[in-house]
Image (cartoon, grey):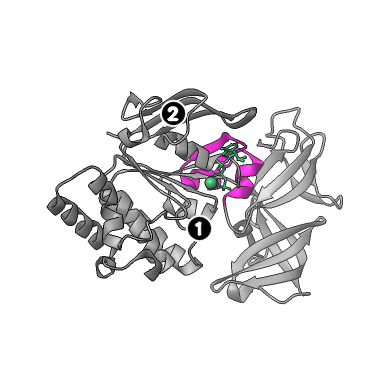
Amino acid sequence: MAEVTIRGLEKRYGAYQALRDIDLSIRDGELAVLVGPSGCGKSTLLRTIAGLEDISGGTIAIGGEVVNNVRPRDRDVAMVFQDYALYPHMSVSRNIGFGLRARKLPKHIIKAKVLSAAATLGIEPLLDRYPRQLSGGQRQRVAIGRAIVRDPQIFLFDEPLSNLDAQLRDEMRSEIKRLHQELGVTMIYVTHDQIEAMTLADRIVVLKDGQIEQQGSPLDLYERPQTRFVAGFIGSPQMNFVPVELAEDGSELRLGDRSVLAADFRRLASPAPRRLTLGFRPSHVAPARSEDARKGHVRRVVRIDLVQPTGARSFVTFQLGNSPVTAEVGAHEAGQVGEDMAVDIDLSRAVLIDDATGRVL
Ligand SMILES: Nc1ncnc2c1ncn2[C@@H]1O[C@H](COP(=O)(O)OP(=O)(O)OP(=O)(O)O)[C@@H](O)[C@H]1O
Ligand SMILES: [Mg+2]
């Protein structure tokens, strides 16, 4: 069993605190994705699990055993790095088998393992080539192959796809997910790309400033963000944020231009903070279809500022109470720049954020 249990983890570089009070339990066989902006501590956390960084406090346990003082190569984890770190003077097959030769396994076993990993990754025809003769995606497969042959308890991936073009990234992403299903081993995957996180993860762990901001299933984070940061980080296009003011009795929300948006937020615990941000996803704004707005929706007539087609869907941007708002609509519902459009905003799925704390109410 290779569950990873982290308790009260701290990591300091001199006076700088890179990780703070990290509590994280990753189940055996789970694919956990660490996501967050540059510098938030993703690589550092991964490297502490691999044993490549000392920790300043707390414990890391793998399969129930605390590994704080266990050397990296005795932790039975394999790490795939962003830059692949292949040996340029070795063929693909020797690169993949490198760790096994270092462990002095018999030749025929190494050969069988290399062939089987190459088959899994579809790179058998490349085994005699050198890294310089490979495309980025092929190099990435070789780096993953080198991890697979070691049969580790845990795979650690640090932004393995960030050097690939968009199409190849999509392809490799499905491949990693398929690999996870096939091997059924624990994987911890670092990315700053929230789409990659959403599509791959059993569980997403959002990091910010060295701390865990929120963790949960992809849909959990998408539908129930607890902070403005998570609400804005997960989902593309980004959630719309509109500053609003709550009337004293909670009976209405006022936009920046003083117009009233919706009635009745009396359900909020009083005294509710007055300066708030209303957050709603572009997919929760739809062109008005029926005579009246549905319950929980508000209707507005807006002027279209920008239309961005993406194929089946288009993103339409307009102003709402002096804030730009984007709607995600069917490609043929988008209208033209400068035209008026009636939209219904589904407020039943909106979030209200307390500006003072950044927390969702
Ligand atoms: N060896 C080090 N000495 C001092 N500070 C460090 C060291 N390594 C990392 N840091 C700092 O710790 C913080 C977290 O770094 P880390 O590499 O974990 O970020 P990251 O989330 O992986 O970012 P990115 O998405 O850019 O890779 C950064 O502010 C970084 O400058
Ligand atoms: Mg990093």
Q: Quadrant of residue 129?
A: bottom left
The range drawn in magenta is: 207-234
Quadrant housing the N terminus: top left
Residue 209 lies in the magenta-colored region: yes
Asked if the residue at tag 2 contacts the one at tag 1, i.e. Cβ–Cβ closer than 8 Å, the answer is no
Q: At 67% across and 56% down in the image, what residue appears? A: 345
Query: Measuring 34% from the left and 59% from the top, which residue is drawn there?
Result: 142
Q: Amino acid at mark 2?
A: Ile
Q: Is residue 78 magenta?
A: no
Label 2 sits on residue: 6
Q: CA distance from mark 1 to mark 2?
A: 27 Å
Query: Which residue is disc 1 drawn over?
Result: 162
Q: Residue at x 76, y 69 (%)?
A: 305
The residue lying at 69 percent from left, 33 percent from top is 268
Vertical relation: 236 (above or below) 304: above
Residue 211 placement (x, y as % from top left):
58, 33
> For the residue labelled by badge 1, is the local secondary structure a helix, a strand or a loop?
loop
Residue 120 horizontal/vertical position (percent) = 25, 59
Residue 241, image x, y percentages: 71, 50
Q: Is residue 285 left or right of residue 114?
A: right
